[in-house]
Image: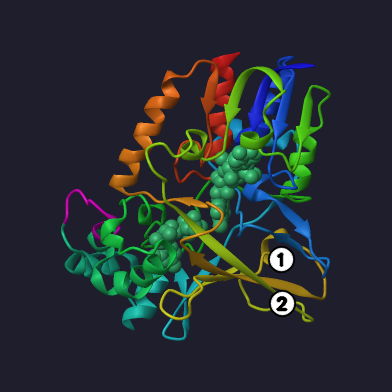
């Protein structure tokens, strides 16, 4: 049987593309090399009956109404606001940095206006920050940079913040009010029955076929299709002909506890101590009511599953060589975090996938 499209990968990029195509009457086959759908957003009930995120906490948020409405076709939501703390010198601070963080850190009782004036004197005046260090010190100064950002970033990325694109730390806002939320997006919610259920519903269409445990590079022979949407690593597609693109990986260490909660917040960051960056107890945001709990510690690693493209000039240049080859191919499209080598959030990937299919069909 022939397919209009072969889609490689069943994360948001692959699954959203598949559904949009199927809704337009196209026959689609998805190949996924893992044993499950959902890509890095996959969640499951562990042996303790806790719904956990296998590949790190996935906090859904977006400002894009189209993305929100599209996904709402496949899930109900549990509205929540994500609150995260950073542990510095044994104390928990609001993070992202806000007025409370500044007052607690400096032992002051500034109003918003006073804090702005104070920080204005401390911040390093750099008009166009060229890297993550400059990005942070130009907004908040060296002290808070050293306490909250420097070592976390070294742990997470394996390089000094002065070697990382400014966009990495620019993900984190600085606020002069007391807003404790991680994000300010209009829509912030978790899929009510989890991400995997959302994916199941999205893929539930007679014109979508799915092959799990199937690697495109090994198993594509004999599959008859007209167009290809590829959401795996772009360097792997081209057999690493220009060299390997670096990715940052993580090791997740889960621990189960016979108590209702382990910590007060869904996430606590540890910038300066330990080899892990953060401890996540996802129950706080999934809202699961159960007397036991599971936490996960995240240990950044240089080898392993490719989770994060590393935003640095030399990597971007290498990526552009691959992109140049990709642009020459007919009927082959590269989309998603790995295929576009971009640090994209779920909603951005959903948006790009919807847009791609609108363009193609
Ligand atoms: P993926 O989810 O990586 O899916 C790609 C799929 O392709 C994978 O399942 C892979 O197995 C498959 N594949 C690759 N190569 C092949 C092949 N050759 N053959 C067959 N299959 C193949 N985003 C947010 O919005 N909020 C968050 O809080 C958030 N937290 C995150 C935390 C962590 C630790 C990580 C790593 C990411 C986080 N993200 C978050 C980002 C989010 O995971 C991505 O935006 C999203 O997963 C991208 O979807 P994707 O389809 O592009 O890639
Ligand atoms: N960051 C930091 N300290 C923190 C949290 C984040 O220095 O306590 C920096 C770090 O470089 C990180 C980046 O900000 O990689 C983006 O943080 P985010 O929480 O968005 O990371 P993600 O959840 O994508 O891993």
Instruction: Note whether 313 is above or below 102 in the view shown.
Output: above
Q: Is residue 133 magenta?
A: yes
Q: Examine the rendering and report whether any part of residue 346 can be seen.
A: no
Residue highlighted by disc 1: 283
Check if residue 105 falls in the magenta segment.
Answer: no
**Quadrant where the image shows the C terminus:** top right
- In which quadrant will I find the N terminus? top right
What residue appears at the point 47 percent right and 19 percent down from the top-left corner?
A: 329
Provide the residue designation for mark 2: 261
Residue at 35% x, 34% y: name it.
Answer: 320
SS of the residue under disc 1: helix
Query: Quick check: 314 left or right of 69?
Result: left
Residue 221, horizontal then vertical, whole percent: 68, 26
* Element at label 2: loop
Q: Indicate the quadrant where residue 88 lies.
A: bottom left
Given residues 51 and 337, the one toward you in this image is 337
Give, as a single range, the part of the protein colored magenta: 126-134
Asked if residue 137 lies left or right of residue 72, the reply is left
Color style of the picture: rainbow
Q: Are marks 2 and 1 in contact (CB under 8 Å)?
A: yes
The span from disc 2 to disc 1 (Cα, nearest Å) is 8 Å
Of residues 240 and 106, which is closer to you in this image? Answer: 240
Q: Determine whether, in the image, residue 320 is placed left or right of residue 198.
A: left
Query: What's the mark number on residue 361?
Result: none
Q: Is residue 86 above or below residue 173?
A: below
């Amino acid at each position: 049987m022939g397919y209009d499209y072969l889609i490689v990968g069943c994360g948001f990029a692959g699954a959203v593309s598949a559904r949009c195509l199927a809704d337009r009457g196209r026959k689609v086959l998805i190949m996924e090399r893992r044993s499950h759908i959902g890509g890095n957003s996959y969640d499951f009930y562990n042996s303790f009956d806790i719904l956990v995120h296998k590949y790190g906490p996935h906090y859904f948020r977006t400002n894009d109404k189209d993305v929100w409405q599209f996904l709402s076709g496949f899930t109900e939501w549990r509205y929540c606001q994500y609150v995260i703390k950073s542990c510095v010198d044994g104390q928990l601070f609001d993070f992202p940095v806000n007025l409370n963080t500044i007052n607690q850190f400096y032992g002051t009782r500034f109003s918003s206006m006073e804090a702005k004036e104070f920080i204005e004197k401390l911040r390093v005046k750099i008009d166009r920050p060229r890297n993550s260090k400059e990005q942070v010190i130009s907004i908040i100064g060296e002290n808070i940079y050293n306490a909250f950002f420097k070592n976390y970033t070294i742990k997470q990325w394996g390089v000094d913040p002065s070697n990382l694109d400014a966009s990495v730390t620019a993900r984190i806002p600085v606020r002069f009010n007391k807003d404790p939320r991680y994000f300010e997006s209009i829509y912030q919610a978790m899929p009510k029955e989890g991400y995997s259920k959302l994916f199941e519903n999205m893929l539930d269409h007679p014109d979508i076929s799915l092959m799990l445990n199937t690697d495109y590079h090994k198993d594509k022979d004999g599959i008859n299709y007209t167009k290809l949407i590829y959401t795996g690593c772009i360097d792997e597609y081209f057999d690493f002909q220009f060299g390997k693109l670096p990715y940052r990986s993580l090791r997740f260490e889960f621990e189960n506890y016979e108590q209702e909660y382990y910590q007060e917040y869904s996430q606590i960051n540890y910038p300066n101590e330990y080899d892990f960056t953060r401890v996540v107890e996802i129950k706080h945001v999934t809202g699961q009511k159960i007397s036991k709990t599971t936490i996960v510690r995240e240990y950044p690693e240089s080898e392993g599953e490719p989770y994060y493209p590393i935003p640095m000039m030399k990597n971007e240049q290498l990526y552009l060589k691959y992109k140049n080859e990709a642009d020459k191919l007919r009927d082959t499209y590269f989309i998603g975090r790995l295929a576009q080598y971009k640090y994209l959030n779920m909603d951005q990937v959903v948006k790009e996938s919807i847009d791609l299919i609108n363009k193609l069909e």
